[in-house]
Image (tube, rainbow, N blue to C red):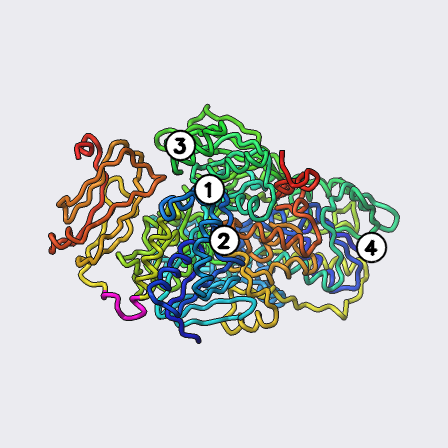
Amino acid sequence: MLDVIIIGGGVIGCAIARELSRFKLQVLLLEKTDDICNGQSKANTAIIHGGYDAKPGTQKARFNVAGNKMYESVCAELDVPRKWNTSLVVSFSFDDHDKLEELLRQGAVNGVPDLRIIGQDELRAREPNVGRTAAEALLVPTGGIVCPYELTAAFAENAATNGVKFRRNAEVISVAKTEGGWRVACKDAVYRTRAVVNAAGLYSDRINNMVSEDEFHIHPRRGEYYIVDKKYADVFHAAMFQLPTKMGKGILVSPTVDGTVLIGPTAEDIDDKADTRTTAEGLEKALRYGSLTWENIPRKDFITTFSGLRAHSDKDDFILGEPADAPLFFNAGGVESPGLTSSPAIGQYLAESIADKLGAARNEAFDPIRHSIPKFREMTMEERARAIAHNPDYAKVVCRCETVTEAEIREAIRRPVGARTVDGIKRRTRAGMGRCQAGFCTPRTIELLCEELELDPTEITKCGGDSYLVQGDVLPNAEEEGGEQE
Amino acid sequence: MKKVQIVIVGGGPAGLAAAVAAWEAGCRDLLILEREEALGGILKQCIHNGFGLHTFGEELTGPEYAARYIEKVEAYGIPYQCDTMVVNISEQRVVTAVSRSEGVQEFEAGAVILAMGCRERPRGALGIPGWRCSGIYTAGTAQKLVNRKGMMPGKRVVILGSGDIGLIMARRMTFLGAKVLGVVELMPYSSGLKRNIVQCLNDYDIPLLLSHTVVDVAGKERLTGVTVAQVDEALRPIPGTEQIFDCDTLLLSVGLIPENELSSMAGVELSAATSGALVDEQLETSVPGIFSCGNVLHVHDLVDFVSEEAAKAGLAALHYAEGKLPQPENQMVVESGFGAGGVVPQRMSKTLAEPVQLMFRSRGVYPNAAVAIELDGAEVARRKFRILTPGEMVRMAFLPAWAAEHPEAQKVTVRVVLPQEGGEQV
């Protein structure tokens, strides 16, 4: 009998896993897809929100502000890149001054510190490249940016180091109450556990509705984005929001911790929870609104486009904790933006409630520290020389655009909850995330996965399932036919 | 820090030809740094023939062409280091490299030759909507998988873009038993060499769909199909013209981009037209003592011309390192006029010792047109072409006498003269 099963390996599930590992509990995390960080957590705006945006009194407001305050220490413990670059909510008409004031008041009620409205002069002094029609802005000093993939991987690695077990490609098909706990079934295994955590993101409604009369429903909301080349890293300093509308926070133009610039997201309600397509209309819209903030967006310097789905629930708020009719079943459902910001606080809150209910003792051996894979591109020449002397694989650059070495890729595979796919390597190391979008490094990355995991190239996928990369040898029958091809 | 007279960054066709030329001119202190495991650059995977007609008067495969130079490098004993990645070049020509065997190395170079080549434009740069599935490769990546790694990317193939690598891969995939359903080209003309269209598409009945593009990509995990539509004159997809191709592989041959990250670190100024360095007739960049040649300078159509250009850079770099290269002064600006794109070099001395090869690509398809060279608006030369297409580099010699005859001239303009303008009369 396990103590806790966590369903879902996104940033929320992994944050809860890490917080639970502070207690003496047998914890297993089940992830439906081939890898952690594969849903909302991999495709979002990567912002540490201040917390002005959520309606006062909501769980979103509470956990956003609480999560924001925890980020500095969490990122320090887990060695995750983050930057406190502030957020600006820009208005494009002086008539909207009242709306900025309203946001400021709302933020103050939520407990967001030091908010203030800045006029033209200060706005342009801070952001000389902001569009000509920009009028004023709300300055959010506690706004920041983070690498969401590394944060999720860091939670998972630290959880695993402290004893949490992870299973990927393990879709939960049923959850049922049993005597003394829960029965959780995957296709190939059945588990018994005292408590269950539902962190299934877009599918958190399905899991909740298996066990509780208090149903909710997720209506996926798609957002499409562009990523612009690193050479524009300094165009904007802050995350540049536009005044929110009913359909979301508007189109954001924001630097990322890796130096690229993000433009997006659009907000489109769709039916299919797996429909992460980009569309011509959506991408066009992102640019149209984005160009209010950034005039003359350099179209020739796009690196890629992507879309992400937000798990918007019909309760219009995070759904956290036990439903009245399902004790020891803990929801972390309907978590959409500001979920990434809230993740440390949600993790802490749920882990403490679960430990309390289960009467768990503290895990005295818990080690909060996790080190990032040392990044060649960030090292000084002296550090590079030392790294190569210690591990010569640091001298072999595989991804030229992001300067990622063989040492980093091998370590990403070998780590706890390590990479198993080309995309898994990409998110853990940035190999393939640069300008050439994996053109140069894919063949070598396939080979490294084969070497480390003792697999055949045909078994290597981009992102699990049927996303194979090569179909076999160019001359599959060469040996049988004595080296001759028909 | 080790002193080296000439450091050559890249051991592909450009780096090799530069090294051989410098050696043959007497340089005995040079070093080629190559990031891959062997010399030869992209030629290693270009196993088709058609290389070397201009240089050697015979048709060679890519590896054979490279071997002609590599054999000389070996015979002369020109030093080279493979598996060595240059990670920085300073304006003072300090080249920093890393390798398994040597760790971090720093070289103080008398002159530096940039010969890093180019990379392919990826899907993301085009913003093609749809799923982000596997099965979408740039043509060069697929070529590497097939020709160097022996792996087959897929069996039913659509190719977007009619650049030369795409055309070559259409034939290659056909040879290997794949079905190539078509080559889709956004423009009303191909950006590849005419001979490749004939030998790689026509000979195998592979359709070339001009003025078409891919408007959607299907397949949640692996690619299952692409939607292709015709485009109008503004290159916008025309609704109602969509057709679906069931395929498991999409290859992209939609442009090459000179790989100038290191050049930028050294402070080298780049051209918006070529994405390569701004150079003078000696192929010297804006940073004294740093030279650029081959596809890192501008994307060539034929490797023969890469070798020719690189040999010139090798010689100029040696002269610089020996203090014999004339100071760049009293220069004219070279401009791309109507119909001409990215003329190289962009600066030129008024006192030339020998003819300068002006190279550019036309910006459209111009049958029966001419190319004129003007000095401050006064035409000094005109040459007729049966057809100008963007797929083929135009080369015209600029003679020293012209500059001598126009000592006050500040500006050289290269432009296309259309037939109705009198282009065919010359």
Q: Secondary structure at mark 3?
A: loop
Tell whether label 1 touches label 2 (CB within 8 Å). no
Residue A340 in percent (x, y) is at 59, 54
Q: Which residue is identified by label 2?
A: A434
Q: CA distance from mark 3 to mark 4?
A: 58 Å
Q: CA distance from mark 4 to mark 2?
A: 42 Å
Q: Is residue B324 magenta?
A: yes
Q: CA distance from mark 2 to mark 3?
A: 28 Å
Residue B36 sits above or below residue B191 on the image: below
Q: Which residue is identified by label 4?
A: A2
Q: CA distance from mark 2 to mark 1?
A: 32 Å
Chain to which mark 1 belongs? B
Q: Is residue A356 left or right of residue A254?
A: right
Q: Earlier in the sequence, mark 1 or mark 3?
A: 1
Q: Which label is found at residue B49?
A: 1
The three-letter amino acid code for the residue at tag 3 is Arg
Which residue corresponds to the image point at 23% horizontal and 63% vertical from the top-left? B328
Residue A173 sits above or below residue A155 on the image: above
Magenta segment, which residues? B319-327
Chain to which mark 3 belongs? B
In depth, the one of A167 and B344 nearer the eye is: B344
Q: Which residue is identified by label 3?
A: B236
Q: Secondary structure at mark 4?
A: strand
